[in-house]
C-alpha cells in the first residue's frame, strides 16, 4: 500500500501578510523617540551596562567593525519602533565613537570599519605612485611621455559580407 503524505491546511495563504491592516507593525507607528538626543538617551545607558559591555567586547575582539555593530543596533531600533530611520542614521557616528571610547578605556582591540581605521603603516600602491611622480617632477624629468597620435591607415573599404549583408547589385 502506498503512503500518501497528509496535506495540512493549517498554514498561511500565500500573500496573506500583504492583507493585514496597515499600521500593525511597530515601524508603521510613530517612533517612541523622535529626536537624536532622545534616541541617544535610550542607547548610551545600555552601552555602559556591564553585561552588555562584556558581550560587546567579545564581538569586537572577533573583528566585526564598530560601524557594523552600530548599524545593526540602529536597524533593530527602527524595526522595534524606538526611533525613525533618519534618527537612526544620525546616531550611528555617536554610537561608534562611544563604543570606541569604551574599548579604548578597557584596552580592547577593535576595528572601526568603513575606511575609518586605515592602516597607515603600509604604503598603498597609490601613495607609492604619487611619491614616485613627485620625485620625478623634483628631478626635472617628464612624468609622462607625449601621447602619440596614430594616423588612420589607408585601407581599402571592406565590403559587407555575410548572410544579411546587402549587395549593391541587389538594390533596386
Image (cartoon, grey):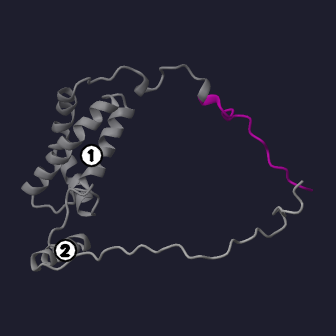
Q: Which residues are magenta?
A: 1-17
Quarter holding the N terminus is: bottom right
Labels in figure, total? 2
Near-viewer residue (39 or 134): 134
Q: Which quadrant would residue 88 be assigned to in this image?
A: top left
Picture coordinates of residue 90, whole percent (x, y): 24, 35
Residue 12 in magenta stretch = yes
Which residue sits at x=18%, y=50%? 53
Q: CA distance from mark 2 to mark 1?
A: 40 Å
- The image's mark for residue 144 is none
- Are there few (<14), some (14-19), or many (20+) residues within 10 Å of tag 2? some
Q: Per the image, is 16 magenta?
A: yes
Q: The residue tagged with tag 2: helix, strand or loop?
A: helix
| Front one among 123 and 149 | 149
Comparing labels 2 and 1, the label whose residue is closer to the camera? 2
The structure residue drawn at horizontal position 27% and vertical position 55%, both measured from the top left corner, is: 114
Position of 88 relative to 93 (above/below): above
**Pointer 2: what residue?**
133
- Please give the residue where the numbered disc 1 appears in the rendered image: 70
- Which residue appears at 16% of the width and 74% of the height? 131
**Identity of the residue drawn at 34% across and 32% down:** 85
Q: Is residue 16 depicted above or below 127 in this figure? A: above
Return the x and y of residue 103 as percentages of the image width and height.
13, 55
Where 74 sits versus 122, above or below?
Answer: above
Spot the residue most to the left.
Answer: 105
Judged by its main secondary structure, the magenta piece is loop
> First in sequence: mark 2 or mark 1?
1
Q: Nearer the viewer, residue 89 or 52?
A: 89
Classify residue 21 as left or right of residue 162: left
Query: In the displayed image of the protein, which residue is found farthest to the right?
Result: 1
User: 10 Å neighbourhood of mark 1: few (<14), some, or many (≥20)?
Assistant: many
Amino acid at each position: 500500500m502506498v503512503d500518501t503524505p497528509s496535506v495540512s491546511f493549517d498554514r498561511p495563504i500565500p500573500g496573506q501578510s500583504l492583507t493585514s491592516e496597515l499600521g500593525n507593525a511597530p515601524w508603521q507607528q510613530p517612533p517612541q523617540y523622535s529626536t537624536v538626543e532622545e534616541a541617544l538617551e535610550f542607547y548610551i545607558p545600555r552601552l555602559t551596562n556591564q553585561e552588555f559591555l562584556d558581550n560587546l567586547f567579545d564581538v569586537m575582539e572577533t573583528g566585526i567593525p564598530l560601524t557594523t555593530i552600530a548599524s545593526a543596533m540602529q536597524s533593530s531600533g527602527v524595526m522595534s519602533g524606538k526611533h525613525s530611520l533618519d534618527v537612526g542614521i544620525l546616531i550611528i557616528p555617536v554610537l561608534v565613537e562611544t563604543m570606541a571610547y569604551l574599548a579604548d578605556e578597557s584596552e580592547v582591540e577593535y576595528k572601526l570599519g568603513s575606511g575609518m581605521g586605515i592602516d597607515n603603516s603600509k604604503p598603498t600602491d597609490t601613495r607609492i605612485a604619487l611619491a614616485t611622480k613627485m620625485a620625478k617632477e623634483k628631478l626635472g624629468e617628464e612624468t609622462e611621455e607625449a601621447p602619440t597620435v596614430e594616423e588612420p591607415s589607408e585601407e581599402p573599404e571592406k565590403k559587407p559580407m555575410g548572410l544579411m549583408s546587402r549587395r549593391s547589385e541587389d538594390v533596386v
